Image (cartoon, helix red, strand yellow):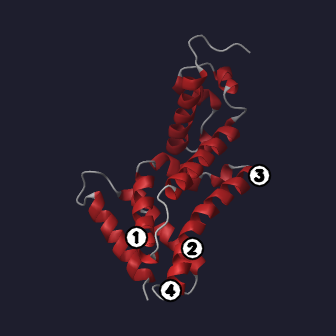
Amino acid sequence: MARTQGSHSDITGPRIRKAALGLFARHGYAAVSMRQIAKEVGVQAGALYNYTPDKQSLLFRLMRDHMQELQQAYDALGETGDAQEALRRFVGFHIRFHLERPDEVFIAYMELRNLTPDNFAEIEDLRRAYEDSLERILSEGQQAGHFAISDTKIATLAVIAMLNGVMTWYRSGGRLSLDEVEQIYWDMVRRAVMA
């Protein structure tokens, strides 16, 4: 199939993903058509299929890329010997990484229901790997006597849910700086887990 005149795969492919990301975040996956995505990019609807087999594949790729980027960025922080410092670093990392990607975060949590079972299973595995990073910190802190947690899995999910809340209300230039918000959240997390 011939490529649309003026189209370049290294430019058009990312533009399609960016357009889909914005449309899915604003309107929801189910409400967005391939035709709308094509219009947003400025290509014919049929041209999208040169870059993605279907809308499901596009949603899956957006979620997978986000989760892989999240894990890679977290892994790049490296190890720290102290569980409390590792937890403090996790809190700051999670808030700052996600604040820069509000559409990706929204889609990663709100559009899971629209994935096929196989795609859902792969994304769930990626999410679990990231959650396991936090649960390891909590378990190590508990074993060292620094943390008092009755169930590390529930604590993991609760901490992540709390941190995700920042994305729904924080606005740059508001009453509190990002540093202040991060400190407040760290204080809340610390008090919730400390022995």
| Residue under the image location 46 percent in, 76 percent down | 83
| Spatial CA span between label 4 and label 1 | 16 Å
Among the two numbered marks 3 and 2 on one chain, the one whose residue lies closer to the N terminus: 3
Alpha carbon separation for disc pair 3 and 4: 39 Å
Residue linked to disc 3: 118
Mark earlier in primary sequence (3, 1)? 1
- Residue type at tag 3: Asp
* Label 1 or label 2, whichever comes before in sequence order: 1
State the residue at coordinates (24%, 61%). 176
**SS at circle 4:** loop
CB atoms at circles 2 and 4 under 8 Å apart? no
Q: Position of residue 20 (x, y in %)?
A: 56, 36
Q: Amino acid at mark 4?
A: Ala
Q: How many marks?
A: 4
Question: Which quadrant is the C terminus positioned in?
Answer: bottom left
* Horizontal relation, residue 151 to residue 78: left or right: right
**Residue 136 has which mark?**
2
Of the two numbered discs 2 and 4 in the rendering, the one whose residue sits closer to the viewer: 4
Along the line of sight, the residue nearer the viewer: 7 or 42: 7
- Asked whether disc 1 touches disc 2, contact meaning CB atoms under 8 Å apart, the reply is no
Could you classify mark 4 by the number of other residues whose Cα lies within 10 Å: few (under 14), some (14-19), or many (20 or more)? few
Decide which of tag 2 and tag 4 comes sooner along the chain: 2
Q: Say what amino acid the circle numbered 2 marks.
A: Arg
